[in-house]
Amino acid sequence: MKDHFIYPEFEVVRNDNRCIQCRVCERQCANEVHSFDPERGIMLSDETKCVNCQRCVSLCPTRALKIVKSDCRLRENANWADDTIKEIYKQANSGGVLLSSMGNPKPLPVYWDKILINASQVTNPPIDPLREPMETKVFLGKKPEKIKRNEDGELVTETTPQLELSMPVMFSAMSYGSISYNAHASLARAATELGICYNTGEGGLHEDFYIYGPNTVVQVASGRFGVHKDYLEAAAAVEIKMGQGAKPGIGGHLPGAKIVGDVSKTRMIPEGSDAISPAPHHDIYSIEDLRQLVYSLKEATEYKKPVIVKVAAVHNIAAIASGIARSGADIIAIDGFRGGTGAAPTRIRDNVGIPIELALASVDQRLRDEGIRNNVSLVVGGSVRSAADVVKAVALGADAVYVATAALLAMGCHLCRTCQSGKCNWGIATQRPELVKRLNPDMGSRRLVNLMDAWRHEIKELMGGMGINSIESLRGNRLMLRGVGLTDKELEILGISHAGE
Amino acid sequence: MKRVFVNEDWCLGCHLCEYNCAYANSGLSDMVKALKGKDIFPRIHIEETDGITYAVSCRHCKDPLCVKSCIAGAISIEDGTVKIDKTKCVGCLTCVLVCPYGAVAAGPEGAAQKCELCLANSCGSPACVKGCPNNAIVYEER
């Protein structure tokens, strides 16, 4: 039923002096906002359907279009914001749970922006990354407690399996089904070219992408979609997904409409059936249970691959991480509350979980205090937006970061946050063939490689400025960070001093 | 010789190539001025049927039928590029008839016209290629 209470959120502004009626906007809008009136020879728009994805704006050859937020407002009210009232209208109309996509857009604190990075001056020289070698390579996995020698006094160099990355960044989990074949192809090809890893998410691995296995992290989530022996063996690492930053404590639901063709085959479920990931793993109710799954996966892969356990950043994350570090997992991935999603209940996305910066600092500290930091590597995600965020995360104690939203943006996402509609005009969060083809993986992978190359340069510049020539020397080096505008408690949790101290 | 190739997998049927072509060959420096309110005569056009779209333009054949068929001697090959001299063209449109690709068409003044790779206009290289949002049209040696 159409909701007459809600005035359209956006206005389509067309500059008629510029519009040449080429109708590119009409052809490119899967939401059918634009249409051509042959009688009057003009373009029309139905802004009720507009999601502000900017596809038409980007492709308009004469820049005749812009999408603006409508200034038609409800009567001002500091307590009842427009969005709050409209959500009430929507629920009164539908009786349903509100759905949203991508990360939490609320104005909650972004701690990255309140942390500043050090640089060398006078007494300690900065390093010029263009003239001197800089190491950004990292190895993820369990590290030896101490140096061991054999009977002949030679160093024992065997380690448990490690995930080698050319820079401390991986593309985080996005399932085939939630994103398109071409988006997966772009991520897989870019990860391979970059010497990093991408993550299949919980939707299985399409048979065409097994060739990218050495740069693939495969996920085992509560729905166990697409998990079989070859899948596990194809990967560089196996990730058990316990939770996701955007929707901690709940599962997933990919509607039957998206379970078509190869998605159904890859997930190993019938076409048209809803893919429901339960909230818990039904065989995991304790760290001991988790340990069983960790070792089941290690057995299945002959102890050749590191096992990652991914959890959402929640209140007791330090204790949870401590348990995971003792479960036999090689890597812990923590996903903060600003992490993205293809669809989540709005209330969960916007109100559940904690900021990744605080979770990371408290987990790293807890694992150090307990003497088990070497048991695991730490990977954090949940809105790492730039090379500066990467450097701050590493200095707070992360071994690497997961990025997904930034990767989607590189592929063309304009963060309109309507992935759940399945009508992504950029060919990313859709399974409709005519939309999927809009993402050419040649371009998608090139743009991803460009983005990561740029970040790598920036990471080196920032490290060089601090007089550090290896990412290993930056990890957990919180002396390189200072806070601004933070309370004593926040500084204490982050384990950093205030600027000026 | 570099030619224009189209990959049907990535052609979105957005028709931007047609407008970029018409603009590039307009001789004007403003797209709005060149195209607004006018019928356009692009030298590339989108063929579309159920779910398939494909941009078609001159293949610059090695042994072109259009050159052989031209009764006025208006079509010639210059460094591999098939060109039409519109001052010689009598508008009989035999070339349109014989082109197996449907890549030749009548222009606004009646003379036949076709893709000449934007080599002679201010664009310098094919405008359709530069403007294709999905790299479906490429200009390369094959």
Image (cartoon, rainbow, N blue to C red):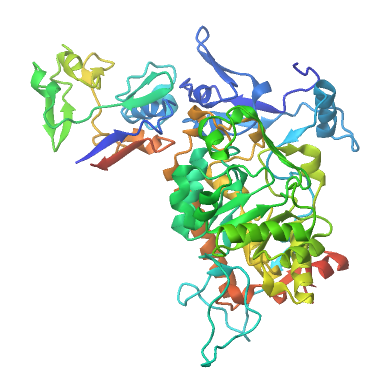
Q: Nearer the viewer, residue A395 or A181?
A: A181
List x then y, in percent, for residue A65: 56, 29
| Residue at 67% from the left image edge and 64% from the top image edge | A329
List x then y, in percent, for residue A132: 47, 77
Q: Nearer the viewer, residue B50 or A223?
A: A223
**Farthest top residue?**
A39
Q: In which image quadrant can residue B42 be found?
A: top left
Q: Is residue A351 left or right of residue B22?
A: right
**Farthest bottom residue?**
A152
Q: In which image quadrant can residue A226 be found?
A: top right
| Residue at 9% from the left image edge and 17% from the top image edge | B72
Above or below, A136 relative to A343: below
Q: Is residue B123 left or right of residue A487?
A: left
| Residue at 75% from the left image edge and 16% from the top image edge | A1
Q: Quadrant location of the N terminus of chain B?
A: top left
Q: In which image quadrant can residue A88 be found?
A: top right
Above or below, B41 relative to A193: above
Q: Nearer the viewer, residue A402 or A323?
A: A323
Q: Is residue A164 left or right of residue B108?
A: right
**Total number of numbered labels?**
0
List x then y, in percent, for residue A392: 67, 66
Residue A476 shows in the view: no
List x then y, in percent, for residue A347: 81, 39
Q: Quadrant location of the C terminus of chain B?
A: top left
Residue A293 shows in the view: yes
| Residue at 51% from the left image edge and 75% from the top image edge | A128
Above or below, A46 relative to A97: above
Above or below, A446 relative to B120: below
